[in-house]
Image (tube, rainbow, N blue to C red):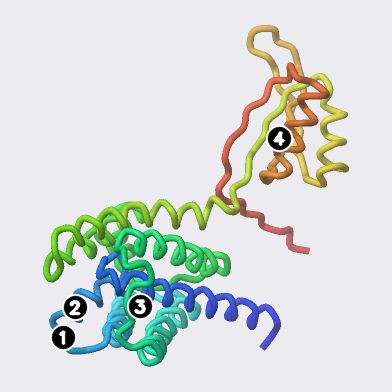
Amino acid sequence: MNKRFLKEYGIITVGTAIIAAAVYFFMMPSHVTVGSASALAMVIANFINLPVSAITLALNVFLLIIGFVLIGREFGAKTVYASILMPLIMRVFEIAFPDFSSITNEPILDVLCYILVVGSGLALLFSVNASSGGLDIVAKLMNKYLHIELGRAMSLSGMLVALSSALCFDKATVVLSVIGTFFGGMIVDHFIFGLNLKRRVCIVSDKHEEIISYILHEIHSGATLYESIGAYTGEKRMEIIAIVDKQEYRMLMEFMHKTDPKAFMTVYSVNDIRYQPKKH
């Protein structure tokens, strides 16, 4: 086993443990079913005399099998590992903390805590290209066979699970489950994309040499140059394009304010950057 393998599976283990803790210590005591396989297991547990961890394990294994049969082997060992590990960790919590009650004694606060904690766990899994399985597989099935966009399929499957709480819980819990699922998706997006958010800055300035030097040597980032032509004047000028993080963006804006406050600039948010290294 190499160091990268151990590091990635260590991150998956920690991320999965965080998600399992969020489910057991915040979602289960409040009975709020924020869209996930574990939430569906909570509903089913009201009709079958089995622990939520056992039902979650059965659901995850069933969905993995369905996924492999109908979609193919695109889930990978990481998703299989996380899908099996999570209910096992939940079982440890069930044994170590039987009949656990709410920490906050307030369902709304439990849901907020769950959303924040589970978001951090999912972000760890996403950082090593892993998934917790469960409803991710349902969404991929809906995407393939019903041609529903993947993000929308995730939201729809989560909402259906949240609405299933009406089978065994009161109206207030159902409403809170739906609201929690909606805002949970937003928070997860923030954890997954927001923490790595970068900005694509396009600059047109007569002082492009000074700006490029600053980008390369002061904030130690890269830049690309394009020759642009003004449609009205026909004048040729250099356009600088740089991808920077939040700190680098702040430094660049301070430099631009001092060096060329009249420069023409456009700024875009960048959620993902892919780089294919050259093969030698």
Residue displayed at 76% across by 17% down: 236
Mark-to-mark CA distance, 2 and 3: 24 Å
Q: Which mark is residue 241?
A: 4
Image quadrant in which you'd find residue 229: top right
The image position of residue 84, as x and y in percent, is 40, 84
Callouts 1 and 2 close, C-beta under 8 Å? yes
Mark-to-mark CA distance, 2 and 4: 53 Å
Assign a secondary structure to mark 2.
helix
For marks 2 and 4, give the one nearer the viewer: 2
The image position of residue 105, as x and y in percent, is 32, 68
Label 1: which residue? 48
Assign a secondary structure to mark 4.
strand
Closest to the observer, 192 or 110: 110
Q: Amino acid at mark 2?
A: Ile
Residue displayed at 26% across by 66% down: 32
Label 3: which residue? 68
Q: Is residue 225 above or below residue 144?
A: above
Residue 98 can be seen, yes or no: yes
Label 2: which residue? 44
Residue displayed at 71% across by 22% down: 228
For marks 4 and 1, give the one nearer the viewer: 1
